[in-house]
Amino acid sequence: MSETRYALNGMVCTVDHLASAAGVATLDRGGNAADAAIAANAVLAVTAPHMCGLGGDLFALVHDGAVSALNASGRAGSGADPARLRAEGLGRMPHLYDIRSVPVPGCADGWLALHERYARLPLADLLAPAIRLAAEGFPASPLLGPVGDFVGTLPGAGDFAAARRPGDVIRRPGVARVLTALGEGGRAGFYQGEFGEGLLKLGGGEYTEEDLARPNADWVEPLSVEVFGHRVWSVPPNSQGYLLLLALEILAELGPPADPADPRWAHLLVESARAAGHDRLDVLHEGAVAPLGTAAARSALVDPERRAPLPDVPAGPGDTTYLCVVDGDGMGVSLIQSNASGFGSLLFEPATGINLHNRGIGFSLTPGHPAEYGPRRRPPHTLSPALVTRPDGTLRTVLGTMGGDAQPQILLQLVTRLLANGQTPGEVIGAPRWELGTGGTGFDTWRSVPLVEVEEGAPWADGLRERGHTVETMEYGSNFGHAHLIDVLPSGVLAGAADPRALIGAALGR
């Protein structure tokens, strides 16, 4: 069970207590929610390379009187050639150890865009806690500690060679240099500096200097729907965030039971997620128009008592990190940042030791597909931050989760518990979850027959089986996301919870 924490003057929730502490310290120095989000994410880029980092992408929602959306997802290099991959006999993008599944990382551009529009403090000051941890060392978390025997043997990954158990000290001097260069030299310090030069060399023609000179961050129009007396927000395609919003619309049409322990509650949420996402492979791509407003037709596909014969929508785990911040002035940031799967591609830029994401696995290799791998294209993305406002437009909640393709399904459960069932943040975050899974790579959504994976301790397994679902009970843990949320109570008090599945996550206030 997760405990609800309360604060008056600001709160930070992350997967790592070191990152949450850096965010709160930033608020104490006069920074706002954007400052604190950058500082916390920078620490995570050092201490949680198995989830996120400078070699990955970033999305964010910001509430500062109005809602803004940031898409800092990178584009494939100019050398992207789908015909070459097909000639090699590949029908899907390579999952690991292949530079062609590594778009130009967007994280640093995301920090810079967030800083330029909203921040108060100098960027170098925000990066200072992360630089100190990278240079002087930090204790490995329970999830990072055992990686040395495998990851530490990979080319460029020597930083992790000594990691064997939680608490082992890890130093990342190359990351410290890059963060220093970013803080002092801005974008050029990263993309045209030591890291950028190494990426060009490692790419072997996948990228050009012009690719690295082009910023990857765009402020885009957020998406929203009105459900359960509130407005829920996410980011548009190439993100799959619309799946959360469409599933909420479908669920609102159906009407969830008042008791989340009722197996019918889980059934209706599962079927709403399936009805929202059964055509995801066809409709999700950069520039797509999200199919919101189709809830009435899609809800008609749902049988309130039986599993419907819809095209299947399996999902699986991913490795991502989510953080949220609300400051004393009411500004909120919902930020998600990721390598895609685990350490990403398991390729490391050798000079700096920065591991590179494999977000390019979202591309299609089908000729003519709107999400086909190609030069300077953004791939379909799992990252789905969320934010909730009240009818008067004021901030109610910032929330999100890791979980790969299952992110909208996990968020559907969290939002329903919070808004429709009236649970506290601790109850929402600590409650058992389900997801649609395949047992595959974690990014096999929409491709094979799914089953409903139910977390140990959940009360729904037998009731779901009776309704025609194939159910597997799975061990409590990160397969079901690391979710965090901060709720702004009517009194103005902040109520937050960090996911206990993260083991060292922390909701810290001031």
Image (tube, helix red, strand yellow):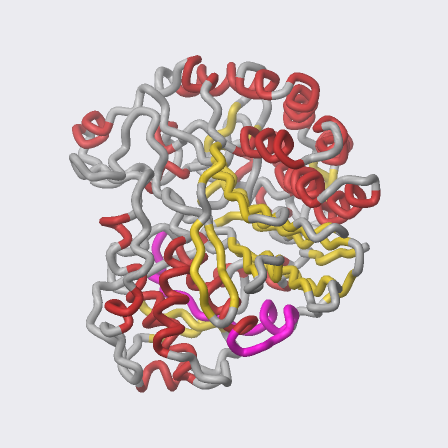
Q: Position of residue 395 (x, y in %)?
A: 62, 57
Q: Which sits in the foreground, 98 or 56?
A: 56
The relative height of residue 304 versus residue 448 in the rendered view (above or below) is below
Q: Which sits in the foreground, 259 or 21?
A: 259
* Residues rendered magenta in the picture: 420-441
Q: Which sits in the foreground, 173 or 74?
A: 74
Residue 198 placement, left or right of 186: left
Residue 47 placement, left or right of 466: right
Q: Position of residue 332 (x, y in %)?
A: 64, 50
- Residue 338 forms part of the magenta stretch: no
Could you say which quadrant of the image residue 431 lies in? Answer: bottom right
Q: Position of residue 475 (x, y in %)?
A: 50, 69
Tell me which residue sits at (29%, 38%) in the image: 93
> Can the viewer see residue 161?
no
Q: Position of residue 53 (x, y in %)?
A: 57, 37
The relative height of residue 127 versus residue 31 in the rendered view (above or below) is above
Q: Residue furthest front?
A: 392
